[in-house]
Amino acid sequence: MDDKRLKIKFGERDLTLDTGKIAKQANGSVTITYGGTVVLVTACMSMEVKEGRDFFPLTVEYQEKTYAAGRIPGGFFKREGRPSESEILTARLIDRPIRPLFPKGLFNDVQIMAIVLSSDGENDPDILAVNAASAALCISNIPFFGPLAACRVAKVQGELVINPTYAQIDNADLEVIIVMNNKGIVMLESKAKEASEEDYLEAVKFGQGHLKSLILMQEEFTKKFGQDKRAVQLKNTPSDLKEKIEALSREKLKEVYRLDKKENREEAVHLLTKELEEKLTLEGYSADQIKMALSEVEEEEVRNKILNENIRLDGRGFKDIRPITCEVSVLPCTHGSSLFTRGQTQSLCVTTLGTGEDEQMIEALEGEKYKNFMLHYSFPPFSVGETGPVRGPGRREIGHGALAEKALLAVMPSKEKFPYTVRVVSETLESNGSSSMATVCAGALSLMDAGVPIKDPVAGIALGLIKDKDKDKELILTDIAGLEDHFGDMDFKVAGTRSGMTAVQLDLKIDGISLGLLEKCLFQAKEARMIILDKMNALLPKPREELSSYAPRIDVLKINTEKIGELIGPGGKNIKAIIAATGASVDIKDDGTVLVGSTDASKSEAAIKMIKAITDDVEVGRVYIGKVKRIMPFGAFCEIAPRKEGLIHVSELSDKFVKNVEEVVKIGDEIKVKVIGIDELGRINLSKKQAEQPA
């Protein structure tokens, strides 16, 4: 085997890159090892470009096979199926930083595949996959302006840790995924428990210091084992066509960008496109070439307007936020709802409360885990005035939902304080700039409307960047609209409370930004966040005291752990009987916590009484409703709780003389009895006559 390897110390462990041993028919193939976690990443590119293509078809697939952790998949089919949310999010984690580093005009199919071959249950393979993808592209013959390097930094008990384990991540106050190249920061993905901007910058700087060694390692790896890059035909706009379109459209585009509404601008550009096609197709240019050239002219017009005239398309200042309106309780029968509108972006969020039975079980490489807070994001085609197929959530929807979920998770109450399963669904009804951050705002309001005792309201904002390399000019735009995102250089999303940040996501279309620019962005985002929080607080400053009448009520009981088996009963007999008799849900925890849930208070009360009857110790002097089970000449045996019987002696049946027990009680009768004694053998003595006496 022609095994080619490099190894360095990275954090607490050795990190190894291998190539030349497996998957040798791929354009580039790298195996990365860290501890006992091993990931294979391959990079392939098609030989030809499909006719009529006008985009770069990069696809990234990431797969976690359960054999990597020594397990067989659950379920009926016993093999991996569609990607899990975690796999999709990791695929996006790989895609987002590498996408800007391919040459413009490359329209060949490029596919990156990452497969986790081994998992040690300690080290997350996602960061390894990003590094191996960069290395595989660098040593391949695919054009790529790498390398880049990635790491995860966590703040655990006040200390910064590089590449933390799963256990350390679970206990971290701040978690930052940093991707950088020689020119600066390329991507950030973070969650935090209300981190300050200063602490965040410290974590990023700490990560950058470690990543330099990974970049040097990949450069050496490429120098030793890399191939020559293949000569490919880049599909760029003919210069003469662009000149013609500039002459025909420049003035009209200026008029288009004076229009206020997005839909009006889109209609005007559509008409302009058709007009140009009618003229220029006669000269031998294709419709695809004309659209591509017009898009380039549009981009220049938008960027020049901002950079040279210091004017945004809608006339706002660089730090201005579009008009915001908020509403809560917009839907009558839901547990909590809100409508958040910012400019032409609108999110309807609905919160639903459930019991422990509604928790989501996730089968991950590190083992099974349960989620009691979920946020699901939806982006229907009508939100941007288009038609389209309606299928399951796409990767973008899953990514946006995960970001908003992280932003809100930091303020969610503990299960001990609020023993509900909580689901928030965001329906994006309009979109023109950062619907994910609108989801954060609407989600926080809907949680408070539902009475979920979140720590603080959370707001989110998206910032953009227009950078002129020639003039060394950088303009940061607060609350970017769709075109500013499309033609800009950055999409930077920050969510948080008044006390600090809870989620950060940075994506670039350029090849990196400096730590200084990141600092400016963070503090500009903070200013905007405070303005949005003011708007939200004016509507609903804190969670409602009472839950919706439609929400389930969950009562919490604590029983002796030795009584758990008795409560469940043989084969679950007792607990099933309680649920069947009352209609309430009953969730029993290993520590003796019992959660009783129902939308009907009387059903919960009935279930609680039945639970207490089984689990509470029998008390002398307490009155029970018992059922006569057996009759003897000397009295009757009465069941006062499952598997708990006592004797009513004939002398305790009535104030009068009782000759025949069956004259007073019969088998199956339900009667009121009082516990009058428990002997040294645990036998219970009951009295019917004392139970009937006035208190």
Image (tube, helix red, strand yellow):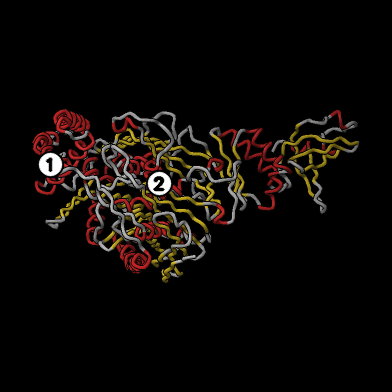
Q: Which of 260 and 54 is in front in this view?
A: 54
Label 1 – label 2 distance at C-alpha: 45 Å
Residue 182, how many percent across, how many down? 27, 63
Callouts 1 and 2 close, C-beta under 8 Å:
no
Tell me the number on the disc at residue 240.
1
Q: Where is residue 559 in the image (x, y as percent from the top left)?
A: 64, 49
Q: Is residue 364 above or below residue 268?
A: below
What amino acid is found at the position of numbered circle 1 in the picture?
A: Asp
Q: Residues within 10 Å of mark 2 (few under 14, many from 20)?
A: some
Secondary element at tag 1: helix
* Among numbered discs 1 and 2, the one appearing first in the sequence: 1
Disc 2 target residue:
402
User: To which quarter of the image does residue 206 belong?
Assistant: bottom left
Please tell me whether mark 1 or mark 2 is closer to you in this view.
1
- Which structural element holds mark 2? helix
Q: Is residue 267 left or right of residue 399?
A: left
Residue depicted at 26% across the width and 61% down the height: 184
Q: What residue type is labelled 2?
A: Ala
How crowded is the residue under tag 1: few (<14 C-alpha within 10 Å), some, or many (20+)? few
Q: In this view, does 293 lie above or below 681?
A: above
Q: Kindly identify the residue that appears in the image at 56 percent across and 56 percent down.
A: 69
Q: Which residue is drawn at 44% across and 53% down?
A: 114
Question: In this rendering, does residue 550 appear at all?
Answer: yes
